[in-house]
């Protein structure tokens, strides 16, 4: 079945009037390669430079400057054929388990049970909800005064973060590898998308633009927020792609959860493209606490069913306090990078620093280098390497665009990775 026929069938499914000026496009990225990671397996990975995906998008010109649009984009893991990537390695992230031995005053069996509940090798690291269109699910209306969009979309703050990333949110050098929570990928360091949201976007011919996003109950990347709000101001002209972005989530109780502020972008000058970005993240009330308490209720509470109520209440409250402390985030992050066009390819390089401001002081520095060679307008091959210098309790380990790296084998150990891959856009 060819593309024209498929597009026609999709048009019929969406009941697009035949007389209207419409356009429906099937698109995607197929990206896979081999990754070697220190302390982890050498394996075939999907989404090395770009997350592999298949998408459908369309527009209908309804006149007077108005257009209806939609976008549905599904994650595809080429290594397994699923939609749920796991962490690259199965090393334990020890930071989340800090302080569990304090529960020994209640029972010496509690801490081991919780460690087992908090650590599940091979568990999905992304798209835990098993959503079909996890990457994007949106419909909207473009008007002469801007666009109004509804659904699951990239957040304003993350769009600025991605524009400032010299590795374009991919390969083993992407900036996000050292911003995932405190000491490692224990929590998100930025809300990439938000579901249950409405967004307003505007772009001026001068290059200035902006966006506002708002979500109610069930919003945020994992759908855990009671409310989400974000905004960005951008400028894209004269070689510049710059932005200022802000995201704020609210946990299930309505308290401030993950808040991020990002400034940065790029500037293209002849054969060079320069990148720089600043990102700070703060979270005093993680929306994941509810998940951890559910783990307690499933794994620990039944074993304590015969204990006095005061005993059970105190034990659960102690655990909640430990997890709230372990999920605190307060960090500043910086990244600079450059692209240099070389023949049919480009050299990519960056340096990133995560400055942890919590009492843990678990900082990390990442240095990355890559060469990306274009075989055609749609197909490229690449090789990339990176090293992360971890301090104190930090266990950051390089991953890829489609999957987080996981953790180093021990706190303070360097994380290293090398990858080669091929990416085809269609």
Image (spheres, rainbow, N blue to C red):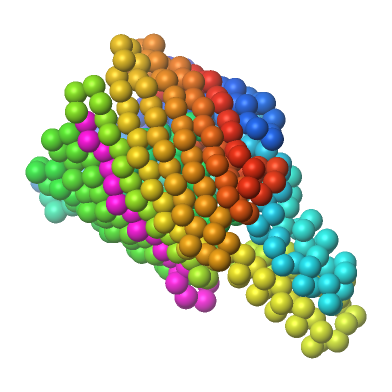
Q: Would you say 343 lies left or right of 281 here?
A: left
| Image quadrant where one finds the C terminus | top left
Viewer-proximal residue among 383 and 213: 383
In terms of secondary structure, what is the magenta stretch mainly? strand
Q: Is residue 292 among what the camera can see?
A: yes
Seen from the viewer's position, the closer of residues 28 and 259 is 259
Q: In the image, residue 400 lies at what x, y percent?
A: 53, 34
Q: Does the magenta portion include 264?
A: yes
Counting labels gives 0
Is 100 left or right of 9, judged from the image as shown? right
Left or right? Give the position of 65 relative to 395.
left
- Looking at the image, which is closer to me, 377 or 8? 377
User: Where is residue 164, by image quadrant?
Assistant: top left
Residue 311 as seen in the image, left or right of residue 221: right
Res 70 seen here: no
At x 71%, y 60%, the residue is 97
Q: Position of residue 302 (x, y in %)?
A: 84, 71
Tell me which residue sits at (12%, 50%) in the image. Answer: 144
In the image shown, does 396 or 309 lie closer to the viewer?
Answer: 396
Q: Residue 161: image x %, image y %? A: 36, 47
Q: Residue at x 82, y 84 (%)?
A: 311
Where residue 151 appears, as percent x and y from the top left, is 39, 53
Please name the residue shown 59% across and 33% down the image.
416
Quadrant of res 281: bottom left
Q: Which residues are magenta?
A: 249-268
* Farthest-out residue, right: 306
In the image, residue 108 sits, relative to residue 211, either above or below, namely below
Residue 385 falls within the magenta-colored stretch: no
């Amino acid at each position: 079945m060819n593309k024209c026929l498929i597009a026609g069938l999709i048009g019929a499914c969406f009941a697009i009037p035949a007389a209207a000026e419409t356009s429906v496009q099937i698109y995607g990225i197929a990206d896979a390669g081999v990754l070697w990671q220190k302390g982890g397996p050498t394996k075939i990975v999907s989404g090395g430079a770009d997350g592999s995906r298949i998408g459908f998008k369309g527009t209908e010109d309804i006149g007077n400057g108005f257009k209806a649009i939609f976008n549905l984009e599904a994650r595809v893991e080429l290594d397994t054929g699923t939609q749920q990537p796991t962490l690259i390695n199965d090393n334990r992230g020890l930071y989340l388990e800090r302080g569990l031995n304090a529960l020994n005053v209640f029972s010496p069996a509690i801490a081991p049970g919780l460690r087992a509940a908090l650590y599940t090798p091979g568990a999905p690291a992304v798209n835990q909800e098993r959503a079909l269109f996890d990457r994007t699910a949106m419909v909207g209306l473009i008007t002469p005064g801007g666009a109004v969009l509804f659904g699951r979309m990239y957040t304003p703050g993350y769009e600025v973060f991605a524009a400032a990333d010299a590795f374009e949110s991919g390969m083993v050098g992407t900036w996000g590898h050292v911003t995932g929570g405190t000491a490692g990928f224990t929590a998100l360091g930025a809300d990439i998308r938000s579901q249950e949201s409405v967004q307003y976007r505007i772009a001026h011919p001068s290059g200035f633009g902006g966006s506002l996003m708002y979500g109610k109950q069930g919003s945020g990347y994992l759908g855990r927020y009671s409310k989400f709000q974000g905004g960005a101001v951008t400028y894209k002209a004269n070689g510049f792609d710059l932005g200022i972005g802000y995201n704020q989530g609210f946990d299930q109780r309505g308290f401030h959860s993950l808040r991020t502020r990002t400034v940065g972008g790029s500037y293209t000058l002849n054969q060079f493209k320069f990148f720089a970005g600043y990102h700070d993240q703060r979270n005093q009330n993680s929306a994941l606490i509810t998940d951890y308490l559910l783990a307690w209720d499933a794994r620990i509470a039944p074993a304590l069913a015969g204990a006095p109520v005061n005993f059970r209440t105190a034990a659960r409250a102690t655990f909640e306090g430990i997890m709230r402390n372990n999920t605190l985030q307060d960090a500043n992050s910086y990244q600079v990078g450059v692209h240099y066009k070389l023949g049919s390819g480009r050299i990519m390089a960056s340096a990133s620093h995560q400055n942890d401001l919590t009492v843990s002081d678990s900082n990390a520095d990442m240095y990355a280098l890559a060469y990306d060679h274009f075989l055609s307008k749609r197909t490229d091959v690449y090789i990339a390497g990176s090293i992360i210098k971890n301090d104190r309790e930090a266990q950051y380990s390089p991953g890829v665009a489609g999957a987080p790296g996981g953790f180093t084998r021990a706190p303070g150990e360097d994380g290293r990775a090398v990858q080669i891959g091929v990416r085809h856009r269609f």
